[in-house]
Image (tube, rainbow, N blue to C red):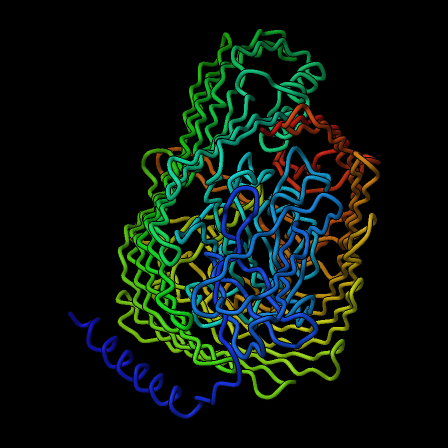
Amino acid sequence: MKILKPIMKIFSLLIVFLLITSVLHSQEKKGLTISGILKDGESGEALPFATIQLLNENNGSTTNSDGYFTLFDVPSDTSTLVARYIGYNPEPFKLNPGMERSPVIILMLPSTTELNEVVVKGNVSPVMDVAENMNQVSLSPSQISSLPGIGERDIFRTLQLLPGISSTNEASSGLYVRGGTPDQNLVLLDGFTVYHVDHFYGFFSAFNADAIKDVQLYKGGFEPKYGGRISSVMELTGKTGNSQKISGGFGLSAISANAFLEVPLSDKLSFVLAVRRSYTDIIQSGFYKDVFDLYNQQSSSRQQSQSRTNNYLQQNTAEPSFYFYDLNAKLSYKPTEKDVFSLSFYNGKDNLDNSRKNENSFSRQDGNPTTILTDLTDKLNWGNSGVSLRWARQWSPRYYFNLCLSYSDYFSYRDRLSNVTVNSPDTLRNTVLGSNEDNNLIDYTVRFNNRFQLNRAHTIEFGLHTTFNSIDYTYLVNDTLDLIDKAQDGMLASLFLQDNWEIGSKLTFTGGLRYSYFDVTNKSYYEPRLSGEYKLTEKLKVNAAWGEYYQFVNQIVREDVTQGSRDFWLLADDKTSPVSYAQHYIAGISYETAKMLFNVGFFQKDMKGLSEFSLRFGNASSSTQSDQFFYEGTGVSRGMEVLIQKKFGKLSGWLGYTFSEVVHNFPLISDAPFYALHDSRHEVNLVATYKLGKWEFGGTWVYGTGKPYTAPVGKYTITTLDGHIFDFINVGQKNGSRLPDYHRLDLSAKYNLKIGKSEASVGLSLFNVYNRKNIWYKEYQVQEEEMVETDVELIGFTPNLFVNFKF
């Protein structure tokens, strides 16, 4: 195979480089080498991405995804180690003579006195309580329940409250990171890729917080071991389950119910199951109706209002049916303290049936009775599934490897058919209009990652990743107009090598290269990446990062000026859809004490190969002609982030500010560069939590300047040969107008109580407390030869009661 030849050449070069590096940079052993594993003292779960440090010394390490760590140059076999992990009490661990000969096990207990939701730390091996830059964010899902939300604990909504991540995209749980879009983020759950990250039109994350142990978000400048996306990386680690006893719980909110169960099948085998389902198809709350009407503007209330104005008599014969669900399951097996086998599964789906029949009767001005019968079929469903089989082994204190085989898929299907009959004494007219949109994506991936710690100064990582994608997308209008019909297959093979290098006591440096071969374009892609940090003092540090990134599967925006744009997945082919490219430039400075963090960062992201699909410049007549409506562009995002965080005490939280601009350039769509749809010049996030006895209070306030939109300036009509009439829009400057500023206050209160040995909590969350009428987008309709503008408003004041129980 052609793909093997370049891969083997690059792999040989990486091996040679690894051998040379190990010889040149090997140092004399200055002390003991201690390795071990960090675990939850109650459940026995491994604690990933925690920090281990020698007490009162600048020598530390980080646990990997399975809780393993290695600490070099330990001066004595009676030294004291200190372990730290979000949501757990710091745990000192005193070594005893002989412990260096076998892995140590350190147990930590969950914190019951402090709440520290988010810790921002650097993208190199950190030491205790040192936030080295703003590129990496660690989040513990178990610790976010005090923050207010739309309905329940939400991982993505919490991350949206950080600087550099847009917090004003209320109708999307996806992350807009430093000017990027959600499809430009690599989202991994236990090793498999997740392509769609939300439920309920974007108002809820697709991930059940009860199934997730740890979240790592890399906002930019990420290392060569991650690839395939140009904006950011989110790595989610699922729970392995309680290995000591059966435990579980359930919860109830205004929209959904959830439950989870952790079962130790043996002392080496554990199982986790978490399920969540909305009950909106059974009970339709006021919040559900608000959200549904937001996305389906032909609500009965609006129709009845129009009917009264025109003397209509209207009858509706159906109510919409909608529900979503997700299921997480994980089986973990630890035959030895060095080996971990796991099988993870996820499935999530949204299903909407908005089919209905309407009958409107009225009298015309000439007195003749007229009846309009509308029979609308409107069915929409979308979702993800994924499975991964993983084997990880700590072969020695220095060498660890992780092999993961995964499968994931995404689907989105909409079938819409409108049959309208107008019946009067002198008229009998029947009009049938419809569309069908179907997008399917399959992903098979193998990831083989290796980590070799030469010594305290050098940690080398290398590996091989291979992904096979199969994608198809069809967009059919009125059964005869096939606007888009694509079926694609592609293989991507990648190799990476990186070195984390500590140079003296003040400078750390990470450099590496990622090489990829993509058989669709038959091209090779090289992605060099560098990052570093310099300690001016123990509390004051500066950092910088640079890197190149490519993306081979893209979500294309299908522009719709009248009803809001939609999107679909396609493989890049350098014809209709180019390979996306970005170059990151990042610099920052941070000052941290034991209780406070002050951080300022600057970023710029240069992007090429952006894609958009737009029909506003013509009308395709066949599938072969649809390629002319794919447009290629470039972009740049730049800005500044400020974070002030109070980390300890009963009152904790942070203030975040982002100044940024996102500019796109599509020469065939606009004569001049224009602001991207998600551009917001200023954003402010204020987050606070307060604990008082058994009570926990939370509050968030977000503000963002208005986002751009394209305003129509007129319309024109085309009549086809078969008599169909189509209205097309004349638009003004691309994204030349701005929506009003966005702001919102959310509050919550939660009461924790003990019921025997079990725990329960009852709470109230208030969303949009002062009922701000934020505008999502503007909708335009042609009525009696005039363009009518409608503001589509987001959710107003919404209370939500919730109950949780754990045993």
Relative to 592, 271 lies left or right: left
Front residue of this view, candidates 322 and 70: 70
From the viewer's perspective, tell me whether residue 582 is left or right of residue 343. right
742 or 539, nearer to the observer: 539
For the image, the number of numbered tags is 0
Percent across and percent down for residue 281 are 52, 19
| Residue 434 position in % (x across, y down) | 41, 31
Q: Quadrant of the N terminus?
A: bottom left
In which quadrant of the rendered view does residue 744 lie? top right
Residue nearest the observer in this picture, 198 or 472: 198
Relative to 493, say whether 176 is above or below: above
The answer to whether 445 is drawn above or below residue 347 in the figure is below
Counting from the top left corner in percent of width and height, residue 666 is at 52, 66
The quadrant in which residue 683 appears is bottom right
Residue under the point 46% across and 40% down: 243
Where the C terminus falls, by quadrant? top right
Is residue 161 visible to us here?
yes
Residue found 67% across the figure and 26% down from its top: 803
Relative horizontal placement of residue 281, taking residue 569 as reference (left or right): right
454 lies above or below 628: below
